[in-house]
Amino acid sequence: MTDLDALSQLIRSDAQARGQTISRLGYFCAPFRPDSGPLSDKVIKVYRGLRDVAALERLHQCHDDYVDALLAGDVPMPQTEFHLLDLDGAKVPVIVQEALPVDSLMRPLMQDAPVEATLEMMEAAGQVIARFWHWAEAQEGRIGFHPSIRNFAIIDGGAVFFDTFPPLIHYSREEMGRMLLTFSDKRLMRVIGPLMQRRVTGIQDEWYSPAETLVGLVGSACRLRPDHAAAYLDWGRDFVGREMTPWADEALAGLNAPPKLPGYWTGFRKLLGLQGEPNV
């Protein structure tokens, strides 16, 4: 278990003392990895604190349940802990996760590898997606998955998923829509978001659709390597026929051409400076 006193001290320290910021473009936080000390083999993710203790306790339970669900769905993951720390008069959600090698992150690998190698990575990620949804099909309640290219690492040829926030379990669609604003690290989003709550709420819909998660993966690959879009579309159509037959018709309808992000989400991303960096 994590030393919570050491964790609290680390979070209170200034940015230089914390260590390496892994990504500055995350929607919910900027994860960092300490350069030294007892947590140097961890990635730390600090989210916005709240004074609503009941909401945070529910968040904690939902996160624990979500990690359990991902593991039950045979989704490979690094060791992940969720903590609520008392910092500056508020309880702050913190995720401590086993650090993955930086050179294993799928997005930069996809940018530089030959097309044949990128298709192998897509197959590895697709297998994780298919396994999860075949498992989830037999579960009760609302559960989602956000298996984008930036949320995977490739280790020993297999895909490892590392994004557990927000926990896509138990919350209703409306509750998750509000959460997308409540925990956004971008003040601008918290200010303008409520004016477009309906559109913000719609961001999550892809995460709860088996077909759309696979289409989204293919769309990310097509945008990342547009010269190879035809190869990724061919792979996607073949994959859903092999591995995701219950959702094949819906997925195939989205794979006639390179999938595009919804216009409102593209606008949000540009406004907030989110350009698809790895969300470690």
Image (cartoon, rainbow, N blue to C red):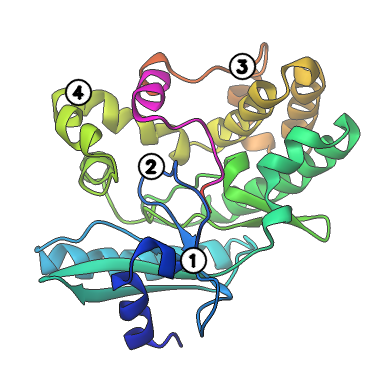
Q: Is residue 61 visible?
A: no
Query: What is the quadrant of residue 218 in the picture?
Result: top right
Alpha-carbon span between mark 3 and mark 1: 45 Å
Q: Residue at x 56, y 36 (%)?
A: 213
Alpha-carbon span between mark 3 and mark 2: 29 Å
Q: Position of residue 12 (x, y in %)?
A: 28, 72
Amino acid type, mark 3: Ala
Q: Confirm or deny contact between disc 4 and disc 1 (CB under 8 A).
A: no
Taking the magenta stretch, the answer to whether it contains residue 271 is yes
Comes first in the chain, label 3 or label 2? 2
Magenta span of residues: 266-278
Q: Secondary structure at mark 1?
A: loop
Query: What is the quadrant of residue 257 in the picture?
Result: top right
Q: Is residue 136 left or right of residue 192?
A: right
Q: Pointer 2: residues within 10 angstroms few (<14), some, or many (20+)?
A: some
Amino acid type, mark 1: Gly
Disc 4 target residue = 196
Q: Nearer the viewer, residue 41 or 146?
A: 41
Comes first in the chain, label 3 or label 4? 4
Q: Nearer the viewer, residue 131 or 207?
A: 207
Q: Is residue 233 visible?
A: yes
Disc 1 target residue = 19
Amino acid type, mark 4: Met
Disc 3 target residue = 253
Query: What is the quadrant of residue 55 in the picture?
Result: bottom left
Where is 47 relative to 95, above or below? Answer: above
Disc 2 target residue = 27
Comes first in the chain, label 2 or label 1? 1
Q: Confirm or deny contact between disc 3 and disc 2 (CB under 8 A).
A: no
Residue that sits furthest to the front in the current view: 16
